[in-house]
Amino acid sequence: MQKDNPNAERYISIARACLKAINDTAGNAGAREQKIQAVYEAIDSAFRAEFSGYRQSLVIMATVLERIASGQLDGEKAADLARKTLDQQPESTRKALMH
């Protein structure tokens, strides 16, 4: 993966979580299904952690859009609210691609 990819750090973090889960279960005598479940849970947890900022931004932006769509704000106030909302989003959500 290219280091200039905006998702590189996210992918690396998720990959580390996967490898840790695999390494943690490799020596165990547990059932194969339990090992798979442990890796699955590590992946799920890492994804949730990495994308929590996106989810929070999405909720805030949806609320702002609902307010603008209500028609209660004039054009300038709506534009001002949109600018303020964009300025407040976390840096990680401004330029990074999410997929």
Image: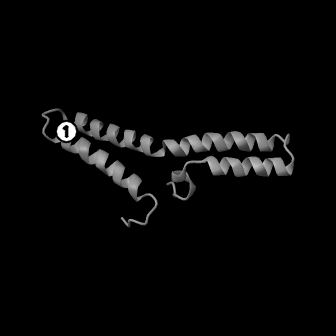
Q: Quarter of the image holding residue 39? A: top left
Does 36 sit left or right of 30 as displayed? Answer: right
Q: Position of residue 35 (x, y in %)?
A: 23, 37
Q: Position of residue 76 (x, y in %)?
A: 84, 51
Residue 13, above or below 45:
below
Check disc 1 and report its element: helix, strand or loop: helix
Residue assigned mark 1 = 25
Residue 89, above or below 3:
above
Q: Position of residue 62 (x, y in %)?
A: 67, 42
Q: Quadrant of the N terminus?
A: bottom left
Category of crowding for the residue at label 1, using alpha-carbon neighbours closer than 10 angstroms: few (below 14), some (14–19), many (at least 20): some
The total number of labels drawn is: 1
- Residue drawn at x 44%, y 40% as measured from the top left: 48
Q: Quarter of the image holding residue 3? A: bottom left
Residue 50, above or below 9:
above
Q: Position of residue 84 (x, y in %)?
A: 70, 48
> What residue type is disc 1 on?
Thr
Color style of the picture: one colour
- Residue drawn at x 42%, y 44% as measured from the top left: 47
- Residue drawn at x 16%, y 32% as measured from the top left: 30
- Residue drawn at x 46%, y 60% as measured from the top left: 6
Q: Quarter of the image holding residue 60? A: top right
